[in-house]
Amino acid sequence: METTYTLKIFRGTPGNQYWEEFELQRHPQANVISSLMEIQKNPINKKGEKTTPVAWEQGCLEEVCGSCSMLVNGRPRQACTAIIENYLKASKSHIITLAPFTKFPLIRDLCVDRTSMFEALKKVRAWISVDGTEDTGQFGPPISQEVQEAMYVLSTCMTCGCCSEACPQVSEKSDFMGPSAMSQIRFFNANPTGALEKSERLNAALSKEGIAGCGNAQNCARVCPKNIPLTESLSLIGREATKQAIKNFLGLPDAKK
Ligand code: SF4
Ligand code: SF4
């Protein structure tokens, strides 16, 4: 078995991206982040030239924060859980490619600016407004076990951007906010207190950045590392948004606040 492998990294700054290769020793437990750290300690490329350390983003290192998202062998995922040995064995190649996401503005090397995702969360009011004046009882309004379970998986979204990266409808030419924001509308509307702002969220889904942008290719659900049922969320929000549009047309009042 070869004792080394090559990390081939698409790096650089906007308008000046290029591939650079690094040869690294194989370690059974190495993942993409630990391999990038090895390069950082000794930034010498495969040609033996001294180069700049590769820039990347990381946070929790346990696939919860979503900050280390990148393309590993062309597929969006978190670098922290991308085990080098698994890739080498599955691809039967000694080369692994790393590249930054393409649907977000590039900062440098593997770092992109995912601000658009957080802006989308603001647009869909991805929070529960509590002004402190209502009496919610000791534990707030009850939520059935069934609804809690459905909500739990939706709550695991880490705004990592894999779904938007895979979605053919998210592009510079489209205003679509992307599937995760639509799924968060479902999550916050499922909460009894959050439901008080259901119509505001559905009106955001009816905007030009909303659900009409989804072409139902379902790539998003295939790449979500948290297995969030995005296809289900998108079709549910599509139906709910249609009902909201009819309500708007007929001038019916919103949910009582
Ligand atoms: S189902 Fe909609 S959101 Fe998901 S990848 Fe397709 S177009 Fe994008
Ligand atoms: S829905 Fe899944 S893929 Fe999309 S941002 Fe959330 S965790 Fe990431």
Image (cartoon, grey):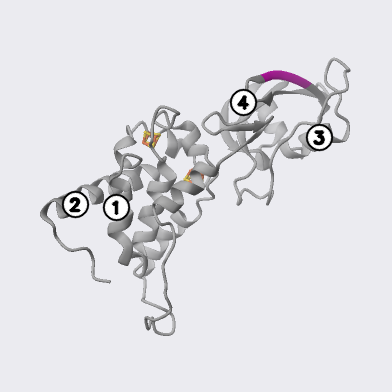
Amino acid bearing label 3: His
- Disc 1 is placed on an element classified as helix
Cα–Cα gap, marks 4 and 2: 42 Å
Residue topped by disc 2? 243
Amino acid bearing label 2: Lys
Image point (57%, 31%), residue name: 101
Query: Which residue ends up furthest to the left in the rendered image?
Result: 250
Cα–Cα gap, marks 3 and 1: 49 Å
Q: Is residue 228 visible?
A: no
Residue topped by disc 1? 202
Foreground of the two, 231 or 13: 13
Cα–Cα gap, marks 4 and 3: 19 Å
Q: Position of residue 146 (x, y in %)?
A: 36, 64
* Label 4 CA crowd tier, 10 Å (few <14, some 14–19, many 20+): some
Residue topped by disc 4? 73
* 4 or 2: mark nearer the eye: 2
Q: Are marks 1 and 2 in contact (CB under 8 Å)?
A: yes
Foreground of the two, 187 or 196: 196
Q: Specify whether tag 1 is near ligand 1 (CB below 8 Å).
A: no
Q: Main secondary structure of the magenta part?
A: strand
**Numbered tag placed on residue 27 in the rendering:** 3
**Sequence-earlier tag: 2 or 3:** 3
Cα–Cα gap, marks 1 and 4: 37 Å
**Sequence-earlier tag: 4 or 3:** 3
**Sequence-earlier tag: 1 or 2:** 1
- Disc 4 is placed on an element classified as loop
Amino acid bearing label 1: Leu
* 3 or 1: mark nearer the eye: 1
* 4 or 3: mark nearer the eye: 4
